[in-house]
Amino acid sequence: MTLKAVVRTETRARVNDFAIKLANVNGTGSASANSLLMKAIFRMGIPVSGKNLFPSNIQGLPTWYEIRVNKDGHTSRALDYDLMVTMNAQTYAADIAEVRSGGYVLYDSTWPLPSELLRTDVTFLGVPLAELCAQQFERPRDRLLLKNICYAGALVALLGVDRDVIATLLEETFGGKPKLRDANQLALKLGFDYASEQLTCPLPIHLEPMDAKEGNILIDGNTATALGCLYAGATVAAWYPITPSTSVMDNFASLCRRYRVHDGVHDYLIVQAEDELAALGMVVGASWNGARAFTATSGPGISLMNELLGFAYYAEIPAVIVNVQRTGPSTGMPTRTQQADLLLCAYASHGDTKHVLLFPANPAECFDFAVKAFDLAERFQTPVLMLSDLDIGMNDWVVPQLAWDDAFLPDRGRVLTAEELHALPRFNRYEDEDAEFVTPRTLPGAAPGGAYFVRGSGHDKRGAYTEVPDKYQEVVDRLAHKHTAAALHLPAPVLHRREGARIGVVCIGSGDLAVREAAELLAARDLPVDVMRVRGFPFPPSVRAFLDEHEILFVVEQNRDAQLRSLLVLETGVSTARLHSVLVYGGFPLSAQQVVDSIVTQTGSE
Amino acid sequence: MTLKAVVRTETRARVNDFAIKLANVNGTGSASANSLLMKAIFRMGIPVSGKNLFPSNIQGLPTWYEIRVNKDGHTSRALDYDLMVTMNAQTYAADIAEVRSGGYVLYDSTWPLPSELLRTDVTFLGVPLAELCAQQFERPRDRLLLKNICYAGALVALLGVDRDVIATLLEETFGGKPKLRDANQLALKLGFDYASEQLTCPLPIHLEPMDAKEGNILIDGNTATALGCLYAGATVAAWYPITPSTSVMDNFASLCRRYRVHDGVHDYLIVQAEDELAALGMVVGASWNGARAFTATSGPGISLMNELLGFAYYAEIPAVIVNVQRTGPSTGMPTRTQQADLLLCAYASHGDTKHVLLFPANPAECFDFAVKAFDLAERFQTPVLMLSDLDIGMNDWVVPQLAWDDAFLPDRGRVLTAEELHALPRFNRYEDEDAEFVTPRTLPGAAPGGAYFVRGSGHDKRGAYTEVPDKYQEVVDRLAHKHTAAALHLPAPVLHRREGARIGVVCIGSGDLAVREAAELLAARDLPVDVMRVRGFPFPPSVRAFLDEHEILFVVEQNRDAQLRSLLVLETGVSTARLHSVLVYGGFPLSAQQVVDSIVTQTGSE
Amino acid sequence: MPSIVKPLIPLATLPRNDLGLTPRNYEGAMSTLCAGCGHDSVTAALMQALFELSIPPYKVAKLSGIGCSSKTTAYFAGEAHGFNSVHGRMPTIATGAIAANRELHYVGVSGDGDSLSIGLGHLAHAVRRNIRMLYVIDNNGVYGLTKGQFSASADIGSTSKKGEANAFAPIDPLMLALSIGATFVARGFSGDKERLVPILKAGLSHRGLALVDVISPCVQFNDHEGSTKSYLFVREHEVSATDFVEPRETIVAHVPDQGVLAVPMHDGSQMHFRAVPAGYDPTDRAAAMHYLQDRHAQGEVVTGLVYADEGVPDLHELSGTPEGPLAAVPFDRLCPGADELARLQDSFR
Amino acid sequence: MPSIVKPLIPLATLPRNDLGLTPRNYEGAMSTLCAGCGHDSVTAALMQALFELSIPPYKVAKLSGIGCSSKTTAYFAGEAHGFNSVHGRMPTIATGAIAANRELHYVGVSGDGDSLSIGLGHLAHAVRRNIRMLYVIDNNGVYGLTKGQFSASADIGSTSKKGEANAFAPIDPLMLALSIGATFVARGFSGDKERLVPILKAGLSHRGLALVDVISPCVQFNDHEGSTKSYLFVREHEVSATDFVEPRETIVAHVPDQGVLAVPMHDGSQMHFRAVPAGYDPTDRAAAMHYLQDRHAQGEVVTGLVYADEGVPDLHELSGTPEGPLAAVPFDRLCPGADELARLQDSFR
Ligand SMILES: Cc1ncc(C[n+]2csc(CCOP(=O)(O)OP(=O)(O)O)c2C)c(N)n1
Ligand SMILES: Cc1ncc(C[n+]2csc(CCOP(=O)(O)OP(=O)(O)O)c2C)c(N)n1
Ligand code: SF4
Ligand code: SF4
Ligand SMILES: [Mg+2]
Ligand SMILES: [Mg+2]
């Protein structure tokens, strides 16, 4: 096989609208090269997304990275790839099969590709990466590692990435380490030069600078969540490591080291707990004692936190829990995304319990909702769970720059001051409810006379143990009302309406972009739909109103059992029969095409 | 105050139809006296129930016992008492206030009752219990303890309890211990003689022998459950003590000591685990290894078992979990009853999970369903949770004698024999599903070639780790189908139909008797209702059919959040709006009156 | 755990501490434990220790799990905040609470079931983090509240009320704690208030986690080997009812400075207590473990301060937190503000 | 944990054991751990031990929790049943499995995170019950799979890949186990297969729970004090990428019979191993603990069989169960039948 033999050209140019997928081996250093490309495209002002599809392994298994570029801002996951970079011999066949007809495959031509892989409807772009690196670098480690930068260089040429942008990025990354910088620059140049000389550059699919970058940043959800916790004033954090939530705490720790150390004093305390039960116990203990405290975990951790979630609900203690969802059940696929903890989180723990949930759709909302979570937890004296997911949490997203209002004051809820306390004839913990059914609390040690006894056992308004039905009911009934009252303090659902839409589509969290893109695609097929994205639980009345407005309703979510639909049915009273499901739960981020296909099929509009 | 002054007579005789309540102090030995009475009434062939309303305490707090006698078999908890025995000075006022107008109060007249307690519309029956005992018994311990038997003696006279029956019972209990027997007989006689001589005996409310006993036994649900586990062939049990489930394991242990020790060999192994997570882990390990294994717990234990429940669901390992429900949330009221773990048990654990549930209504069903639970768990290779409650589990119930068919063979599900295994080209754990979506398993060590790898991580049909969406989905989709398939193997709902009923009433578990009595009371008010008691989850189609048949539907359950209604809505598709709730969740067993009142009010039939 | 309020009978002659408070100020709700329960004696010793140290009650936080022992946090220092959490998780609540506010005095009360079974991992890690608190285990060898199952501290051969013998080796919380680096371990006996109060005071003053194991007999369910017969005896010869709890006298005894004290328990059995000898060096961890094992092999229970090391920093010292409560750091010191957020985001481009 | 099947290259010269099986029969799926990971060496030693003991692979049950270490049950004895459970709960699964069938050979593989944090309570209670199994901890001082957090066995002052120093005292699983009555504790080093195999064989033959702590370096995240610089050094001087895992050589070393062996770790630091000396008496619990503490204070890691007591019955012996598997007792011996049920119910009237 010679290189030239398989090169074919496509004529139709697709500028700033294509998807590429890079197939790598885990632990070989490809992530840096891939995100370099992604970042460069972002800097060129072009809407872009990067999805890291990685295994639950440290070294040796297949891993993929997908970059989608779309001038109209549709950057949910693409399902057909215009260009595949195949760096993993284990998965050659499957990877090459995934390229769309007419697309491209970039491969390491140091060795020939097995002939059975040679599809005739795609263009193979060979770059002798290993050979190029072997010529220039001595050490095996460098040769292996720099192959990645080398293919990045080829892509810079093929896709028309701005070379200045790339140069600046390399400078920023390795500026302080000249040796490293030089090696990377050289590797990049090797790939670039080879492609420029040997291949037709740029490809019909290529980039041109835009201005979509203005006011935007590139950030992953876990970093944004950590920032939110920092800005909300969280001082105590307790956690147990678990993918994909670990980087929430990693980021919180480094932000604290940066912003919370004054004269050697650390205004924070992070405890790596012995397990998730302990982590939530610590958050509850700290919150009871007046600190803003949180934990971050994923599904298995939530399962383990069940007992204490019920305790905090019943004893009315604030707690913020970030659940970065992954694919279940059980250990499931730890590095794959899903939205399958909705039901569990809504009603976690035995007995009658209901929790307050927040559903961010992207890192910007992770920041805002993290701040909101503390306000809600303290205002309503109850656990608040923010349900992000692996797609949001661990992928880089382009979002508007985060904003902060310096006038912001945390809502600490009803905490009695010493004066207020003294003005009371007698302080009873669960008495004197306000319009939202919240009763005032006191902080331990703050003032004499404020003591009360926290318990998860049956208690009356005074907090005293009771086994008297009426006294017990008085308290749990108030809790139910309090939960309902929280609805109006949650972020309202986001509506996208379209002229003449009879169909309503409900979505949640990271489904946002795909569903909005799907709505455009459907409109183009004369199937206009209104979209509502719910952002919190319990649902405000507007959710029910949207459902009532539409004859046909679809609920798009990433789980098998239609859990969002379940919550909607249970809490709005709409019947299951009215809510059709679009369920995608294979573990990869949602793509617009999946939504379109399902709705088209179900409405018989094919 | 003199005794005679407050004695008034009621003329209307109420034979075999009244309720008495005995107010005692915990730890003073009243339970034996109370159950002696209850047992005597049972032996007289009269339908009777005894409800023990006890505190979460070992000694010193108020405790009550309620006996309801009803010739028509309506023995759900009564709310108005014809006779109150007040043995607890702490609660005199409240107890006396509870007696119906025209009723009776039996008190210890050694000391006068405070005059403010003397209602004029009830008859006070004074028996100088302390004095009588002080005259006859030396030791303080005996004086205290035998006061109980003394009031029992008075009740024997007042209510017309068969003296031969009582004599036999005492003989049976203390036969081998003459001293004890004599003391008890004496105490009984003291009370009996005093009442016979000083009071008008029998009261208009009194007993007459019947023949309702034939073929019945008196048994509590936890004993029956233990018996079921014994008969089902359970060999491994693991548990962590928790009220009100502890006696399941206590009974299982004593049954095993009695029936499972052959020539010194113990055909069972019971492990008191370090916590509930461990208990379920042990059950899962043992079941995987081919033993029938179970655990018994209550709400907090279920919360802690969440992670492993999801694991067993996904890895498809049988497990039997008995949940004797108590009042939640959190520690709640450990000695009070509720049906508030329905939602949690149905969907326990993160990710998409669905479990198989059984809802016994009485000890007889505890026995049958316990046996059934093992068959289901092994047939469907999944956790099966039997949801009993404190009322069923810890109170004595009159139920038909338990039956056993010696032809019974346990359904061990699809376990490959060595021959079947060898006949296969290759054994793949999650392949070759049958019509019920069950795939065959092998037992460790049974034969070479049968090995497979159990994991809670994403796996394909072979049981191999996978992160490939299709392969992952293939398995979890089958699990969903398997769950649905189980519906037809669960005990069918029990229907009680009435001519002309437009209203359907759905109930569950221990609500049975009260709802059936309520149906009669409603019929008497020209409000005929059909009753359906669901007995398992997932629901078979007949449940949906019943709902569809009725214009107006009520769901009667003992929790705040209408959890059964939620399950019905989610799994049958009927809208919440169609299901009206009757919710009683103060912690005491359900009474017919509560159901009638609620339905009458809600239907506007007052 | 009903909070029955005790009648307040003013007694002019009550002693006063440095704060001018009387022992009354350190009382709590009326106990609902069984008459004679060892736990009530521990409660009394705790009140005394807090009183003697002149700790303001409202600056005390009382934490517990679930069990008869855990109920006792309601029975002392009624003016202190109490936190009766869930079974076995008290150490985690304590860790969080202490993280938020290092200025309070933390008293954890737990049981042998609560701390040595379901909560064993948490206890171990609290010890490892050396959080500053007094951690009392009311150790009765049984699960009192759930009616008499063996706990992990039950001795081999102990028999339950139902007559079954325990087969498994006991866990000694002090040995366990020492093996993982505890900085303060001591043992007391509920019946010996005289020795217990100073131990509790020492624990309250310790730099980190002070683990005090208190042998605290359960008058209801604690029947050891020698008493099997005695229990059967009672059954044979006495009026018996399964729910009858005989009111008992609290066992009182004083472990001598030297030699072994044999204390008869309610069930007729005997426990052998030995106070650490006069020259005992509580700063040598290996020797302490050796001593405990040695005496245990002789069937003796060592009481007293077994090991203490004031040289190990607590969680806060290790974390470099402010001197006052973390929870009290003003918001403007915690929130970097809008400008800083803008600056930071330059790196996200 | 993908199960990549290894190519089967028939080798005529392979040794055979008493069953006529070759080491090949004890292999499993291809490891997906990092090249050079200590855990793979432990796996190899396990294969060897099972092979040498001529244990039929299908009579082996392999149990694990979650972690890189826990994945390794897939990498040996492919013809044995494997059970990869959830994080920290392996001891509970093992207890149940063993209860059901005492005839299999149980090999548990866990990590220091799995067994000393989330699973610590279960480990302790499995030790206490003396269930018959080989319990291996692949101890690397870090959470490998979740990318390098400190585990509870990390030494004070160890630094993480991110440069933070661990502040908390390490838990030595052997000390912990000894303090609660373990009947077999030993330590090996993944790099010293020659000494590890006999220890594993001894453990497989033990009457109860044999706890074997194996120091098993994580080539990815295990950076000790001395190596902080070395890590920084690498960062300064080498091509660095956050997701790059350098393929490494497995560390191999042989701890001498006497004296201390200093083994250089991947990160440039050194670990000091000391084999128990020739005359060492592994039957004295107190002495064993003393020895461990003593050597630890010297910065040495003791390897070898530290303590063994074959005199303590295992769970089955204590429970009087049948000699064969409980799971195999025929149903008619388990079910008392209809007549007996009728008879029993006479007492319910
Ligand atoms: C999760 C959970 N499991 C079980 C229980 C039941 N329970 C209450 S107290 C207790 C044991 C108490 O024993 P211990 O800690 O020794 O206290 P004691 O009563 O002996 O003082 C148990 C098992 C519970 N409350 N929560
Ligand atoms: C309940 C739960 N919490 C957290 C995790 C994430 N997790 C996976 S492995 C692991 C730690 C592994 O450490 P260790 O046991 O030492 O194994 P190693 O990888 O170091 O061999 C953690 C925390 C999980 N799988 N389940
Ligand atoms: S049961 Fe035992 S531990 Fe509980 S209160 Fe009574 S004596 Fe004390
Ligand atoms: S991360 Fe560490 S423990 Fe995990 S496989 Fe790699 S070297 Fe081994
Ligand atoms: Mg106890
Ligand atoms: Mg590790």
Image (cartoon, coloured by chain):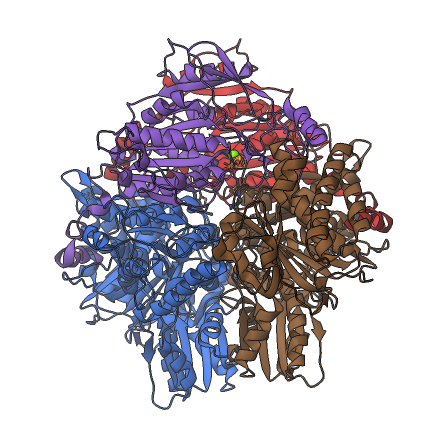
Chain colours: A brown, B blue, C red, D purple
Q: Is residue A294 above or below residue D217?
A: below
Residue at the bottom extreme? B500
Point out the quarter of the image occupied by ligand 1.
top left
Q: Is residue D338 above or below residue A163?
A: below
Residue at 38% x, 85% y: name it: B523
The answer to whether residue A440 is seen in the rendering is no
Q: Is residue B294 above or below residue D303?
A: below
For the image, the number of numbered tags is 0
How far across and how far down the image is residue B131, in percent? 36, 49
Rendered image quadrant of residue A444: top right
| D225 vs A63, nearest the viewer | A63
| D349 vs A94, nearest the viewer | A94
How far across and how far down the image is residue B262, in percent? 15, 42
The answer to whether residue A564 is seen in the rendering is yes
How far across and how far down the image is residue B506, in percent? 41, 76
| D308 vs D232, nearest the viewer | D232
How far across and how far down the image is residue A233, in percent? 76, 47
In the image, is B324 to the left or to the right of A472? left
Rendered image quadrant of residue D201: top left
